[in-house]
Image (spheres, rainbow, N blue to C red):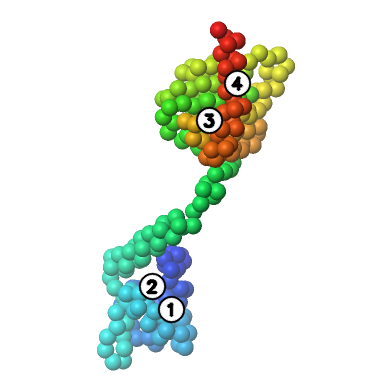
Amino acid sequence: MLVEVLKSFGLSEYEAKALVALVSKGTLTAKEVSEISGIPRTSVYDVMNSLLSKGLVESFGKPKRFKALNVSDIISVLSRRVNENIEILRRELSKLETEEIDVIRVYRGEMVLEKLRELVESAKREIVGVLSYIPESVAEILRRATCRLILISSNARAVENAESYEFEKKEEVARSFKNFCHGIFIFDDERTFSIFINGTQIAIMSESPAVIEFSKMVMIPVIEFMRRKND
């Protein structure tokens, strides 16, 4: 297990085995490292030179003997390398990132409600939603909204803090609505979140200005109609 953990920090299997041997046994010759770790004699000097170049091992004397750094120093060296690699990833990946990569994101399963919760709690100005039916799991999340919340649904009044509009429905249709939830939200005119829950859960989030504008063109007339109807 320890060898596998060390490999996750960029060491080869032989390097990890040699380092474990040195930490556990102390100062060793290359021959002794080979015997304890099982590294082939033909490879052990290359392995030790690699560990020396990585700053994890010291060497001294004739015949040459090797000693690992103390454990805290080994952890410090490995941590520094990890942090350097993360910084390189952050810098280089950001250069490759384009708007198209982030325009559409698909969420499934538990991540649907997790993302909805994040969007609701981070909304600053307005949330608009048009849904067939609001299950309690979604209603509980929507009640967390601290900004203006406008909902149109067969049971919009289930969310007490919303400006709610319920469309007329026949009893048979109402019963079928309770079996699934589908609809769309717009958050602060910056993101759309299309949701579908029917046993499985799936949602699509978009930050595309074109998708947001299209969604508003569809939703705003419906909201205005419902407002006139309720006046």
Q: Provide the residue designation for mark 2.
A: 20
Mark 4 belongs to which amino acid? Pro
Q: Amino acid at mark 1?
A: Ser
Q: Are marks 1 and 2 in contact (CB under 8 Å)?
A: yes
Residue found 54% across the figure and 21% down from its top: 151
Determine whether 24 is above or below 93 in the image: below
Q: Quadrant of residue 174?
A: top right
Give the CA separation, mark 1 to mark 2: 8 Å
Quadrant of residue 165 in the image?
Answer: top right
Q: Which residue is mark 3?
A: 186
Asked whether, in this view, residue 152 is left or right of residue 43, the answer is right
Mark number for residue 221? Answer: 4
Q: CA separation, marks 4 and 3?
A: 14 Å
Could you tell me residue 218's position as x and y percent? 62, 27
Q: Residue at x 71, y 14 (%)?
A: 170
Camera-nearest residue between 213 and 4: 213
Dividing the picture into quadrants, the one containing residue 109 is top right
Q: CA distance from mark 2 to mark 4?
A: 69 Å
| CB under 8 Å between discs 4 and 3 | no
